[in-house]
Image (cartoon, helix red, strand yellow):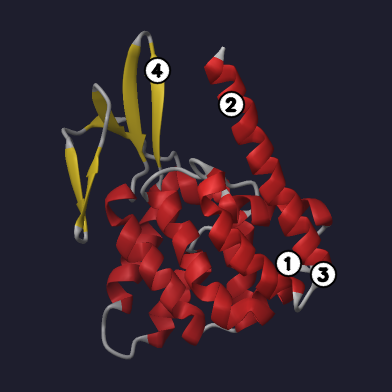
Amino acid sequence: MKKVLIAILMLGSSVIFVNAQDVEVAYPKDQSLVNKLENYYELSLKPNNLFDRKNFFEVFPNDFKTFNSIYGCHENRIKGRYTTFLGPLYKNFYDHIRLFFSLDSVIDKDTFYMKVINIAIDGYWESSVISVFQSCIKERIPNDIYFILKTVNKLSDEKACSFWLFLFDGPYPYSKKSMYEKLYRLVVSKDSKQATLMKQAYNKLLDEERLMKGVDSR
């Protein structure tokens, strides 16, 4: 692992503070996927280059573990010191995620949302990277609810519930009540089964929040 000196990271108009004593980039044993993502991203910036945009989509991670290991930011305590481990493409995560979500115009919608939802399954909220990915899904729900529900309905109830959990995961889930109620009204008008699973997922997060408050209050 290579140590890097990072205290403040610029992300568009935002500033992310990395709160750790040490920051290290965690390079994977197999660098080929990272290289492909970097290469296809750069090539996709050329005007009208649909071929390499589709290639970028093809090599983009298809599950949360891989996605988070490449783009994520993790803080671990090792021998009393907090160390932040950055994925090898952490510095590129915003640009790569925005490109990925723009590809719904050139990729078949069913294929596109299957990859989006596969990444969300078993996922959990973290600031910066995961939060951006989560927000990109939420932005598309009003216009693409048909394709999202169509894809989620191909999954087991357990995996579908995991997707809804990811959508609402994060600090203070009760603060998302207004967003949840608005989305629930949209989903229940089209798919009562998924509305029920979504409700179960959100209530689970509320229960966990109440439990944490109970632990904190003792």
Sequence-wise first label, 3 or 4: 4
Q: Residue 192 carries which label?
A: 3
Q: Nearer the viewer, mark 3 or mark 4?
A: 3
Q: What residue type is labelled 2?
A: Met
Sequence-wise first label, 2 or 1: 1
Whole-percent x, y for residue 162 in the image: 69, 51
Identify residue for label 2: 212
Name which quarter of the figure residue 1 lies in: top left
Q: How far apart are marks 2 and 1 (CA)?
A: 30 Å
Q: For this view, does 158 lie left or right of residue 96?
A: right
Identify residue for label 4: 77
Instruction: Give the crowd class for mark 1: few <14, some 14-19, many >=20 residues within 10 Å.
Output: many
Q: Residue 152 carries which label?
A: 1
Camera-nearest residue between 24 and 166: 166
Q: Are marks 2 and 3 in contact (CB under 8 Å)?
A: no
Q: Nearer the viewer, mark 2 or mark 1?
A: 2
Sequence-wise first label, 1 or 4: 4
Q: Which amino acid does label 1 sit on?
A: Val
